[in-house]
Image (tube, rainbow, N blue to C red):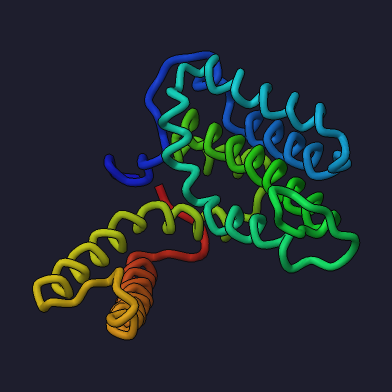
């Protein structure tokens, strides 16, 4: 994996969390997420303890909290959905700041926000303290099917390539007076994304043919 690929989430450091074996961190993350999901949503203090534990690990790894917070924007769609749940859910209603909200909807929104935020923070902590290549090696040690590991490796390798393609296409759109953020130009943005998908698919086929021509038989060759 070439330098510069797959390092957008990784924060370079030398803490004990960084040095811990990747396969152990993967097992701990999976067990922790399952524990958070299985915890009843009425156990508010338990969720607060989980969040404090994750923050403690982040501080122990010497990763700035702002570094993690900026990357939690991936959770925004779930936050929007959680905010809407008390308004659209059925069941008994309660008054909050003059608004009539569903009590089951409030509890569901709380559970989604709490469990989702803790899960995202945990995953970002793993990504910030573990190199992508180490994650792939950890998955192999955990007996993950080799084909899935290879797919993930190529996804990481070509993520920057696809992102760069999208950046160039957006620059071309703006130079032609198209604003991707404007609803008026969303049809043009949709066509651009479609073209990007086709281009990426064709690139994948060319890479696969090149691998076959070099003797690829379903497993990486060193």
Question: Can you give x and y, in whole percent of width and height, for residue 43 in the image?
Answer: 86, 34
Q: In this view, does 186 lie to the left or right of 20?
A: left
In terms of image quadrants, where is residue 103? bottom right
Quadrant in which the N terminus appears: top left
Can the viewer see residue 214 in this picture?
A: yes
Query: Is residue 202 in view?
Result: no
- Give 152 or 64, whichever is nearer the viewer: 64
For the point 74% across and 46% down, the residue is 110
Image height of 129 relative to 35, above or below: above
Residue 1 is left or right of residue 60, and the answer is left
Q: Taking 191 as reference, is 150 above or below it? A: above
**Depth order, front residue of 94/80:** 94
Residue 218: percent from left, percent from top? 52, 63
Relative horizontal placement of residue 1, taking residue 89 as reference (left or right) = left
Look at the picture and state if 117 lies above or below 217. Answer: above
Q: Which of 31 and 214 is in front in this view?
A: 31
Front residue of 65/18: it is 65
x then y, percent, for residue 23: 63, 33
Quadrant position of residue 192: bottom left
Name the residue furthest front: 98
- Side of 63 relative to 53 (left or right): left
Residue at 53% across / 17% down in the picture?
A: 59
> What residue is at 45 percent from the left and 40 percent from the top?
133
- Rendered image quadrant of residue 148: bottom right
List the single residue furthest toward the left.
175
Q: Which residue is drawn at 46% across and 54% down?
A: 220
How many numbered dots are placed on residues in this image?
A: 0
């Amino acid at each position: 994996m070439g330098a510069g690929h797959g390092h957008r989430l990784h924060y370079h450091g030398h803490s004990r969390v960084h040095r811990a074996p990747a396969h152990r961190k993967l097992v701990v993350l999976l067990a922790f997420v399952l524990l958070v999901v299985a915890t009843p949503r009425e156990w508010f203090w338990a969720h607060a303890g989980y969040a404090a534990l994750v923050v403690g690990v982040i501080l122990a790894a010497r990763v700035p909290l702002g570094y993690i917070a900026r990357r939690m924007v991936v959770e925004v769609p779930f936050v929007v959905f959680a905010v809407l749940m008390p308004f659209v859910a059925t069941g008994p209603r309660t008054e909050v700041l003059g608004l009539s909200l569903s009590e089951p909807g409030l509890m569901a929104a709380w559970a989604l926000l709490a469990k989702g935020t803790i899960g995202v923070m945990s995953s970002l902590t793993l990504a910030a303290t573990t190199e992508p290549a180490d994650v792939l090696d950890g998955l192999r040690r955990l007996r993950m099917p080799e084909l899935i590991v290879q797919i993930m490796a190529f996804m990481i390798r070509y993520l920057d390539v696809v992102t760069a393609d999208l950046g160039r296409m957006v620059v071309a759109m703006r130079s032609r007076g198209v604003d991707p953020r404007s609803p008026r130009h969303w049809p043009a943005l949709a066509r651009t994304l479609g073209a990007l998908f086709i281009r990426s698919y064709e690139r994948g086929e060319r890479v696969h043919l090149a691998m076959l021509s070099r003797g690829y038989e379903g497993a990486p060759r060193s």
